[in-house]
Image (tube, rainbow, N blue to C red):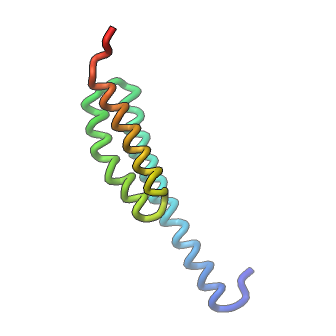
């Protein structure tokens, strides 16, 4: 338990920051889920649109420190590859 005024203030600040980070992380995951669902549904146009909307959200999360920038870039890259593979007809 915090005893000094400065320690009490820090706990308030940390709680506020944690709530903001949790909200941003949840928002990013929601956009990721929308892309995943579009890919699973096999709709390349919807998947491309979902990715176009999700990419700035993922990169914003990286910029705000929610995820590492390399992690965000990897997520975007892998999703883009999957969306691209969905739009190309499978060669038999």
> Which residue is located at x 69 percent, y 91 percent?
4
The location of residue 92, given as percent across then percent down, is 33, 8
Nearest the camera: 58 or 28? 58
- 23 to 50, vertically: above or below: below
Farthest residue to the top: give it: 92
- 66 to 73, vertically: above or below: below
- Compared across the picture, whether 38 is left or right of 12 comes to left
Farthest residue to the front: give it: 70
The location of residue 15, given as percent across then percent down, is 58, 72
> Which residue is located at x 27 percent, y 44 percent?
52
> Which residue is located at x 58 percent, y 74 percent?
14
- 11 to 50, vertically: above or below: below
Farthest residue to the bottom: give it: 5
**For residue 32, what is the image quadrant?**
top left
Q: How many marks?
A: 0
The location of residue 1, given as percent across then percent down, is 74, 80
The location of residue 79, given as percent across then percent down, is 38, 37
**For residue 89, what is the image quadrant?**
top left
> Which residue is located at x 47 percent, y 59 percent?
23
């Amino acid at each position: 338990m915090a005893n000094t005024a400065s320690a009490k203030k820090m706990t308030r600040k940390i709680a506020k920051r944690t709530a903001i980070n949790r909200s941003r992380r949840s928002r990013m995951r929601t956009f990721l889920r929308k892309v995943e669902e579009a890919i699973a549904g096999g709709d390349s146009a919807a998947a491309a649109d979902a990715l176009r909307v999700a990419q700035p959200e993922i990169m914003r999360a990286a910029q705000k420190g929610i995820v590492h920038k390399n992690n965000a870039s990897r997520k975007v890259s892998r999703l883009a590859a999957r969306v691209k593979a969905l739009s190309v007809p499978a060669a038999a």
